[in-house]
Amino acid sequence: MSNEEMNVEKVSAETADSGLPENYAELKKEAGRSADWRARLSAVEELGNYPHRQVIDILTRLAESDPVYTVQEAAYLKLKAFGENVAAPSKNKPELFKGITKILLRIKKSLPRNHTYEEFKEKLKKMRIDVYDAYEGEKGEDFDKWLESKWSSVK
């Protein structure tokens, strides 16, 4: 067995002994991915099986401040299952990102005058994947309708 393999085994054993999942570092990274609400949700689901202080801290941050309600709610439910005293997230948020109209206007102005909605959508995805991802997660099936409405209204 190589030194690297022994180190990985040692870290895995230490993590398991601490009450954290073996892939804790990976899950922590996934929970912090601002451009992938699905990865954050998946991390919440897996972390929610380990009532450890470090996990509780991550779940609390997500329950209180994740821009996507689905992620907030999942983290909240895991915390409640741990017996934590935590406030339920609010579904009614006026804006996920402060200045969203300005963000969208900048993107629209960076495109040719006669661009299509699809071109706008792709440019948003390339320039601000964090914004695109958060609103896609929050709006669900209504995302395209919402984004197209925003696109046509920003001038």
Image (spheres, grey):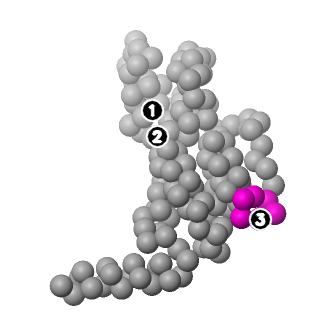
Q: Position of residue 129 (x, y in %)?
A: 45, 41
The residue wearing badge 3 is 84
- Residue 21 vertical position relative to residue 97 in the rendered view, above or below: below
Q: Main secondary structure of the magenta part?
A: loop
- Residue 47 vertical position relative to residue 108 in the rendered view, above or below: below
- Seen from the viewer's position, the closer of residues 137 and 102 is 137
- The residue under the point 48% across, 54% down is 33
Give the class, few, some or many, for how many residues have Cα within 10 Å of label 2's Cα (few <14, many ≥20). some
Q: CA distance from mark 2 to mark 3?
A: 34 Å
Rendered image: mark on residue 124? 1
Q: Position of residue 82 (x, y in %)?
A: 71, 64
The type of residue carrying mark 1 is Leu
Give the class, few, some or many, for how many residues have Cα within 10 Å of label 1's Cα (few <14, many ≥20). many
Q: Residue at the far left: name it.
A: 2
Rendered image: mark on residue 112? none
Rendered image: mark on residue 128? 2
- In the picture, residue 49 is in which quadrant? bottom right
Magenta stretch: give its range.
Answer: 80-86
The type of residue carrying mark 3 is Glu
- Seen from the viewer's position, the closer of residues 39 and 77 is 77
Q: Position of residue 155 (x, y in %)?
A: 57, 19
- The answer to whether residue 62 is left or right of residue 85 is left
Q: Specify whether residue 119 is painted magenta.
A: no
Give the class, few, some or many, for how many residues have Cα within 10 Å of label 3's Cα (few <14, many ≥20). some
The first of marks 3 and 1 along the sequence is: 3
Identify the secondary structure beneath mark 2.
loop
- The residue under the point 56% across, 53% down is 45
> Viewer-nearest of labels 3 and 1?
3
Mark 1 and 2 residues: CB-CB less than 8 Å, in contact?
Answer: yes
Q: Position of residue 96 (x, y in %)?
A: 65, 40
